[in-house]
Image: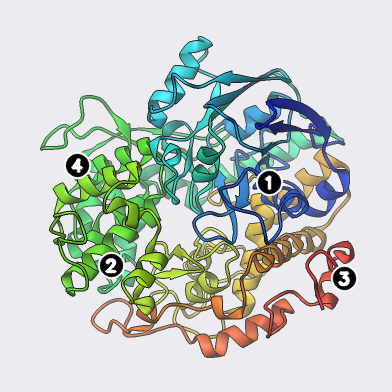
Amino acid sequence: MNGYMGKVLVVDLTKHELKDEPLNEQYARDFIGGGGIACRYLVDLANEKTDPLGPDNPLIFMAGLLTGTGGPSFSRWVVAARSPYTTFYGDANGAAHFGSELRFSGYDGIIVKGKSDKPVYLYIKDGKPQLKDAGKLWGKNTYETIEAIRKEYDDQRTRVVCIGQAGENLALLANIMTEDGHCAGRAGMGCVMGSKKLKAIAVRGKAKIPMAEPEKFREFARGAMEEVKTGFVTTVMHETGTAGWVDSGIAYGDTPSKYYTIATMPEATDISGVTQAEKYQVGNTACFGCPIGCRKVLHIKEGRFKTEKPTEGPEYETLIAWGPLLMIADMGAVNRFNTLVNGYGFDSISGGAAVGFAYYLYEKGVITSKDTGGLELKWGDIDVTLKLIDLIAKNEGFGKILQEGTKRMAARYNRPGEAMQVKGLEVPMHDPRAFCCMGLAYATSNRGADHNKSDAYLVENGMGNPDLGLNPGDRFGDDKAPMVALSQDWRSLTDALGICHFAMMSTKSIVDMINASTGWGVDQDAILKAGERIFQLMRATTCMFGVTPKDDQLPEIAMRPIVDSGQEGHVPNMSKMMPEYYEIRGWDSNTGKPTRSRMETLGMNELVRTFAIR
């Protein structure tokens, strides 16, 4: 199988058995890699009766098709399972060096089944896997875990993914973490890993990825690398990282503040990427093969939260979720929150949103200090926020309620329309009232509100893909259904390939590299069809787990206009966009599932019966 290592490792933790299996060649051809193949395997191994925290819920790690090949920013990997956080389809996308090293260790992916009777970790070197005792690692945070494993093998290039205390304590929003603060975040994949008593996976290897035409691939990769290096997005991301969006977000009304009830907190400029670059930034880190280096290393030298040495800084989502969303604009404090959340290993978006919702409910008198274990929840209180982070990770006290997420909190306190979530997953820090396309993207995303499965707000800012016709328009317009659907298909494809969203290269370069790698001879239309095939597979899977059309909607709080802001009082016109989107997608209006005709058009005939498609 040119382009693939050609095998997956199947780990049965109940039996403590390890075995190699050939990668399913048809799955690879139809669903490419990453989340596409991971979801296809999930369909074979799980169904609507699968307990998200039971031994029968598989945890599937899969590298992208181009991950580790040396092309620009080809570093990404995916982990998928039934989500304990939403109960629907769940996956999380990670970067850094784990995905490439997994392939160098001899595998395209790992399928973890069962549940261990004691803490273990998986170690793979040069195609030889072992299950190792993790008793001494259990209880350590993610930074300590990674360092301990590297020290054990005296090799700083051993690449590790792991859980922290949040995953061990079965906090539903737990992440899987890797080096430099990178995470496979959202949807609770770290909680699934913790339920299996799997503390970490460490990989190391020297294997080569087989290529159909290796010389041509290197030629195409060099051209693509030059495209990325000279791109405008690369310049911005290298200088200010994702935090560079803060100042633009303030202008657009796109920095949600005070739990999404105001559009901006002007003081947020104190934590922006520009401010970080001027006052705190001392370096960058980069993922495998990446010329961008968007991750920032910060040194807070003054104030209450000064650091003894530099640490990886918070990205945009964390900055806003643990800053303005809680009415905090203290760089030292937010940097400290980031370190704690990453060390404990839980979702910074959902975690910040849950804390913000608690502050919101407290202000309205819906909850009191009796509900919070004696804590008074006041906007901007840094000390209380620190305590809540600790409680979430320990799954104790009021943290036991917060770790369940805002959908369950809203049900508990009878405020359903005020939980800023879709399908149980909290809305990220891009307000759908600032970019109405994001309202549609959130409502229709397969794992819940998600800015990575369609970064349509970037399209509106001129950072789309002209090759595909993804061009900017009126950010308040209600003609967004075609653009959102196309951008979702494109991101499904690039995720399956393992390409970073910030690596802006021509579609031709991507097609050329796919063909030189695999020998398939595909064109742009074929890869876009594969992107839609992956998206529709995930849609059918999440419908299998219980999603219906009633779940494809924004909460009432997201439809409250904010006039005095860059949002100019606009809200997404969902009543117009949603029917248009359903028609474009070929979804049944009663079940929400893709129709038989759409599935057959995409060559998914064998899955029609599996998903009970009409």
Name which residue type carries label 2: Tyr
Please give the name of the residue rendered at 56% of the width and 25% of the height, measured from the top-left corner: 121
Residue 314 visible in the displayed image: yes
Q: Position of residue 235 (x, y in %)?
A: 44, 46
Give the mark nearer the N terminus: 3 vs 1.
1
Examine the rendered structure and indicate whether residue 186 appears above or below residue 337. below
Mark 3 = which residue?
600
Compared to 122, does 258 lie above or below? below
Residue to which mark 2 is pinned = 259
Q: CA distance from mark 4 to mark 2?
A: 21 Å
Q: Which element carries disc 1, helix, strand or loop? A: helix
Q: Nearer the viewer, residue 312 or 158?
A: 158
Q: Is residue 385 above or below residue 332?
A: below
Q: Amino acid at mark 3?
A: Glu
Quarter of the view holding residue 534: bottom right
Expressed as whole percent of the image width and height from the top left, the position of residue 595 reads 79, 77
Sooner in the amino-acid sequence: mark 3 or mark 4: 4
Q: Are marks 2 and 1 in contact (CB under 8 Å)?
A: no
Label 1: which residue? Answer: 34
Q: Residue at x 44, y 51 (%)?
A: 173
Calculate the distance from the C-alpha at mark 3 to the C-alpha at mark 1. 23 Å
Q: Identify residue type, mark 1.
A: Gly
- Residue ID at (63%, 27%): 101
The residue singled out by tag 4 in the image is: 332
Q: Label 3: how many residues lie within 10 Å, few (<14), some (14-19) or many (20+)? A: few
Dot 4 or dot 2: first in sequence order is: 2
Could you tell me residue 119's position as x and y percent? 52, 27
Across and down, in percent, residue 386 comes to: 21, 45
Residue situated in front as seen by the camera: 148 or 86: 86
Mark 1 burial class by Cα count in 10 Å: few <14, some 14-19, many 20+: many
Residue 316 appears in the rendering: no
